Image (spheres, rainbow, N blue to C red):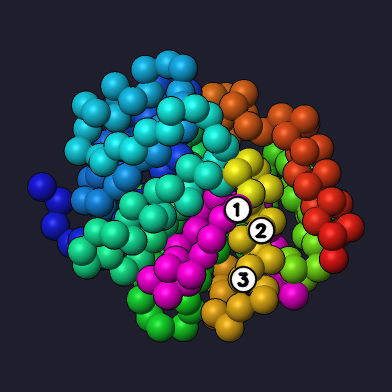
Amino acid sequence: MVQGNEDVWIIIPVYDEEKVIAGVLDNVLAIFPNVVCVDDGSSDNSAQEILGTRAHLVRHPINMGQGAALQTGLRYALARTGSQYFVSFDADGQHRVQDVVAMLDVARSGVADVVLGSRFLENPETVPWIKRVVLRTVVALSPTARRLKLTDAHNGLRVFGRGPADQLRITHNGMAHASEIATVLARSPWRVVECPVTILYTDYSRAKGQSLINGINILFDVSMSRRGK
């Protein structure tokens, strides 16, 4: 049984990830003993794969979207005794556990209440060019991203201290939750810093969520949020 990091909970929204989720959990559980996966109405064997590990499993009866799954996992983790830090982590194998360790070091140092991962602080050339263009455009268009001085407004790797986590209420169920979180942070007194991370762009992750259509959806989300201001 892994020792240490008992005050950390890793929250992983899962939707149809049976091919990779067991491997992702093996890597995470080697360092972090507390992991909750929210199976968001998967139609494959994702839940069975999760049950074969030491991760906790919460299930949505239908697909409600990544934002809803993240909120469910956050509420679950907040109710666990001793929980102090809460990490959102993707299920498709894009995130690295060593980046979480570095981000937690920043959070534990007391300089930040929320630590956000950024793929643009170091080696931005590793990001596929179309994704790079889309994400830089998102930052340019987003008043909240500029207010927070973010370089990467749609990175799913985040660390929240207990205060921000307890007050966060994610109401946008789909991918729009990323913009919602940035808006909440920009309007809050919480100290927010970015930390460099590396995203592993595998063939699998590209097929799951790195398409041009997904980029267009992100831009549409940002443009709609600007209209509401």
Query: Disc 1 marks which residue?
Result: 171
**How many residues crowd around disc 1 within 10 Å: few (fewer than 14), some, or many (20 or more)?**
few
Q: Magenta segment range?
A: 147-171
Instruction: Please name which of the two marks, 1 or 3, marks the residue nearer to the observer.
Output: 1
Depth check, mark 1 against mark 2: the one in front is 1
Q: How many marks?
A: 3
The outermost residue toward the left is 1
Q: Secondary structure at mark 2?
A: helix
- On the image, the x and y values in percent for residue 219 come to 81, 46
Residue 140 drawn at (x, y percent): 84, 61
Residue in the foreground of this view, choosing between 126 and 161: 161
Spatial distance from mark 3 to mark 2, Cα to Cα? 9 Å
User: Residue 180 got which mark?
Assistant: 2
Other-residue count near label 3 (Cα within 10 Å), few / some / many at <14 / 14–19 / ≥20: many
Query: Which residue in the protein does label 3 denote?
Result: 185
- Image quadrant where residue 3 sits: bottom left
| Disc with the residue nearer the chain's start (1 vs 2) | 1
Does the magenta-highlighted stretch encompass residue 190?
no
Taking 63 as reference, is 172 left or right? right
Q: Residue, x 35% and y 66% (percent of image)?
A: 85
Under mark 2, the amino acid is: Glu
Asked whether the residues under the numbered discs 1 and 2 touch, taking CB atoms below 8 Å apart as contact, a structural biologist would say yes
Give the secondary structure at mark 3: helix
Going from the N terminus, do you reach mark 3 or mark 2 first? Answer: 2
Distance from Cα at disc 1 to Cα at disc 3: 14 Å
- Residue that sits furthest to the right in the current view: 227
Compared with 43, 14 (above or below) is below
